[in-house]
Amino acid sequence: MDLSIPLYLENFIDGKLIPPRSGNYMENIDPATGSLFNYVPNSNESDIETAVEAAKNAFIQWSRTSAEDRFLIINRIAALIDGNAHELALAETKDNGKPLWLSKKVDIPRASANFRFFATGIMHFAAESHMMEDKAINYTLRQPIGIVGCISPWNLPLYLFTWKIAPALAAGNCVIAKPSEITPVSAYLLSKICIEAGLPNGVLNIVHGKGEEAGEAIIRHPAIKAISFTGSTRAGQRIASVAAPMFKKLSLELGGKNPNIIFGDCNWDKMMRTTIQSSFSNQGQICLCGSRIIIEETVYDQFKKEFIERVKLLRVGDPLSEDSKQGAIVSLQHFEKISRAIETAKKEGGTILCGGKAVNPGGRCGKGFFIEPTVIEGLGPACETNTEEIFGPVVTLQKFKTREEAIDLANASNYGLSATIWTQDISIANKLAMELNAGILWVNCWLLRDLRTPFGGFKNSGVGREGGWEALRFFTDAKNVCIEI
Ligand code: NAD
């Protein structure tokens, strides 16, 4: 199939690729080169209105389509993603700046896995029944909500976009989806894949544009009854303030400032290798990255020495090169935000142990946005560097003496998305898992994902859970039917 990328991307509404009604576009920049990649529609309320009308018509049939037929169509989308994985990975890398090997290994396979997982899931989805002895039987009807909105960020573009769309479609809803305006291309290509897969017109509508305009039009639209959002805590607050008074169902997956707690008895080599990944994968632009490394005092110096040696080996360079361990930061704006955060760390009295500067890989990437992986020490839990999400290749080191101190340091954050624990003592690991205020706990591993498990955060990291039955429950309305016997 033709997955060529035009200079002007288009919206996908009612099964067709069409320009935005306003005719307005925004520049989409390749962050590795700093040059124009293409133009993305700057859609507005009228585009959302057109998409909603299409979705309303499509819902009549789609909600009545059998689970088995939905399974077949959604599985075809998964197969087409797999069949076109190379083109999709290349597009994702040009759009986002992440290394091509990472797009190939993680982003695109996970996008097809999302569709396959929920296509299969809907075939096994069942509702509860409750007996009242010999009086009555209650059963729960789980029905699709209708039209739902899915809004996703730029860090794992197709991966997170499909993590929402797949369960929404599988549950029988019609979807108005908006990818990040910073990384729109893989969502554009998904439109073409959906046409090829035979997804009925209007079932999925992909509208491109800015958060404040197209995004808010989705949030405000009265016919869109549920919103699944992944992005920053600030945007999540704004979305909740608009959607909550309209009593919309809300799932908010927001920012993180995750602790990575290291005890001296851990499997040292595995911890070291994994901590490099959990600190700097995707240039540290994963909501689950462990940006606060909290180390037992007895091994602090050894950790610091070995960690810095390994960080210095991480080659920052052209994302298309197999040798690049680190690619580009997603945009100039984000590059500047990370650079400012490093300056703040210095002003707060932090010591930059390695990194801290921009990198110029030269060649075609001479004007790209690259930053060295950066390690900082000497800052306490209350400073801005340890409380604000940086969302870049920047980690801090802190030390603890006792288990209680480790817990206090880890919990000293307004975020609560994930935490990682490194120890061979399973009893300590279990105790920490009980005490840490985070929705996702990893013991002696990181980013090991079982798609059936509940995914989401505490505190400012969001509300609601994605994954497995949680997602299918979110995207359905429950009705209790009570029958007297
Ligand atoms: P962002 O909040 O700026 O944007 C995310 C999406 O929301 C984009 O599509 C954007 O256009 C849209 N948007 C922004 N404001 C909106 C509004 N008022 N109404 C409707 N839509 C709006 O986030 P980002 O910079 O793209 O992504 C980085 C953030 O996402 C980080 O904070 C990161 O931690 C978070 N994130 C969280 C998870 C998770 O699962 N918890 C996963 C990935 C990223």
Image (cartoon, rainbow, N blue to C red):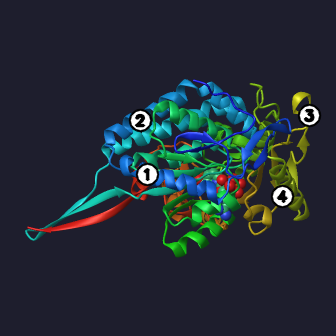
Q: Identify which amino acid the numbered label 3 is placed on.
A: Gly
Q: Which quadrant would residue 362 be assigned to in this image?
A: top right
Question: Mark 1 near ligand 1 (CB under 8 Å)?
Answer: no
Label 1 – label 4 distance at C-alpha? 48 Å
Q: First in sequence: mark 2 or mark 4?
A: 2
Label 1 – label 2 distance at C-alpha? 19 Å
- Is residue 478 visible to the viewer in this orientation of the structure? yes
Measuring 57% from the left and 23% from the top, which residue is drawn there? 1
Residue tagged 2: 73
Q: Identify which amino acid the numbered label 1 is placed on.
A: Asn
For the residue pair 275 and 137, the one nearer the viewer reads as 137
> Pointers 3 and 1 in contact (CB under 8 A)?
no
Q: Identify which amino acid the numbered label 2 is placed on.
A: Ile
Q: First in sequence: mark 3 or mark 4?
A: 4
- Please name which of the two marks, 3 or 1, marks the residue nearer to the observer: 1
Label 2 – label 4 distance at C-alpha? 46 Å
380 on left or right of 351: left
For the residue pair 202 and 424, the one nearer the viewer reads as 202
Other-residue count near label 2 (Cα within 10 Å), few / some / many at <14 / 14–19 / ≥20: some
As helix, strand or loop, the secondary structure at mark 2 comes to helix
Tally the marks: 4
Label 3 – label 4 distance at C-alpha? 23 Å
Residue tagged 3: 366
Measuring 43% from the left and 58% from the top, which residue is drawn there? 474
Residue tagged 1: 57
Label 3 – label 1 distance at C-alpha? 50 Å
Q: First in sequence: mark 2 or mark 3?
A: 2
- Please name which of the two marks, 1 or 4, marks the residue nearer to the observer: 1
Q: First in sequence: mark 1 or mark 4?
A: 1
Question: Mark 4 near ligand 1 (CB under 8 Å)?
Answer: no
Q: Identify which amino acid the numbered label 4 is placed on.
A: Ala
Residue tagged 4: 341
